[in-house]
Image (cartoon, rainbow, N blue to C red):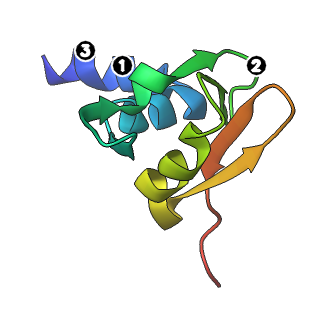
Amino acid sequence: MSDKKSQKEEGKTTADKIWSEIQELSLDLFALPNQKVSMHAKRVPIHDEMVHLKLSSQAVLAALEAALGAKYLIEPGEQYVAVKYSSPKV
């Protein structure tokens, strides 16, 4: 069984791994309880090394930055927000 899981993990792109890590993170947004990243951001498959998200509102950006912390780098664009792993400190 673990072989199937490891094979499944091997086929994942970096973008897949990031999305699986962040989609269920809680957002402190609009004073509403139980808000998740996946409720306010839709993944757009553009690049394999980073996740591109279409946000439901620009107000989500600040909450997303707070939820993701220092582990991820967020690059806002005109239509999408790119999320990737932040580079390790040297």
Residue 7's disc is: 1
Q: Is residue 72 left or right of residue 38?
A: right
In the rendered image, residue 68, in percent from the top left (x then y), is placed at 46, 53
Query: Decide: marks 1, 2 in contact (CB < 8 A)?
Result: no
User: Which numbered disc, 2 or 3, marks the residue that appears first in the sequence?
Assistant: 3
Query: Which residue type carries mark 1?
Result: Gln
Decide: few, some or many residues near mark 2? Use Cα within 10 Å; few <14, some 14-19, many ≥20.
few
Q: How many marks?
A: 3
The reply to whether dot 1 and dot 3 touch (C-beta < 8 Å) is yes
Tell me which amino acid carries mark 3.
Answer: Lys
Q: Position of residue 43 (x, y in %)?
A: 58, 19
Whether residue 4 is situated above or below residue 59 in the rendered picture: above
In the figure, is residue 34 to the left or right of 15?
left
Q: Which residue is mark 3?
A: 4
The residue drawn where x is 61% and y is 80% is 89
Q: x and y percent of residue 87 in the render?
A: 65, 65
Residue at 34%, 31% (x, y): give it: 36
Identity of the amino acid at label 2? Ile
- Residue that numbered label 2 is attached to: 46
Q: CA distance from mark 1 to mark 2?
A: 23 Å
Q: Secondary structure at mark 2?
A: loop
Q: Quadrant of residue 7?
A: top left
Q: Quadrant of the N terminus?
A: top left
Say which quarter of the image contains residue 73.
Answer: bottom right
Give above or below for 21 relative to 48. Answer: below
Disc 3 secondary structure class: helix
Q: Residue furthest bottom?
A: 90
